[in-house]
Image (cartoon, grey):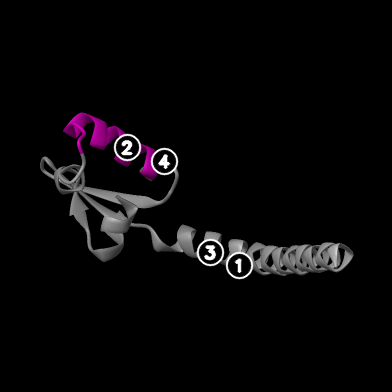
Amino acid sequence: MLGDLARRDHTVSELARPYDISLAAASKHVKVLERAGLIERSIVGRTHTCRLAVEPLQEAYRWLADYRAFWTDRLDALEAAMRRDDEARLEQKR
């Protein structure tokens, strides 16, 4: 649903349509996303329109970027250590 909302605003009915869920289930899902601060909902009459809340996602992206760099470095170091270990084993067999 977040991916759909990244492209444009949707009603709850539009969000539910591509999934094999009831409108009630979609509404519950939307409420969870709204409580999490990931979407904003406006109500006009009986129509509930959802919009992606960009700022919380941008904050999460910035926070995760630091960890992405850390883990990329760690995984690169692990890969290098494993290659050295493999090369050492091959040398011992010769």
Main SS class of the magenta portion in the image: helix
Residue found at the far right of this picture? 92
Q: Reading the chain from its start, which is encountered first: label 1 or label 4?
A: 4
Q: Which residue is mark 3?
A: 61
Spatial CA span between label 2 and label 3: 22 Å
Is the residue under label 4 in contact with that under label 2 (CB below 8 Å)?
no
Q: What is the CA distance from the residue labelled 1 to the residue labelled 4?
A: 24 Å
| Residue at image location 81% in from the left, 66% down from the top | 90
Could you give the CA–CA distance between mark 2 and mark 1, rounded to whole angstroms? 27 Å
Q: Is residue 11 above or below residue 24?
A: below
Badge 3 marks a residue whose secondary structure is helix
Q: Which residue is mark 2?
A: 29
Q: CA distance from mark 3 to mark 1?
A: 6 Å
Residue 26 among those drawn in magenta: yes
- The 10 Å Cα crowd at callout 4, few under 14, some 14 to 19, many 20 or more, is few
Q: Looking at numbered disc 4 in the image, what kind of residue is underneath it?
A: Arg
Q: Where is residue 38 drawn, in percent x and y?
A: 40, 51
- Quadrant placement of the C terminus: bottom right
Q: Nearer the viewer, mark 1 or mark 4?
A: 1
Q: Is residue 59 left or right of residue 39?
A: right
The residue labelled by disc 1 is 65
Residue sitting at 71 percent across and 69 percent down? Answer: 76
Picture coordinates of residue 74, whole percent (x, y): 74, 64
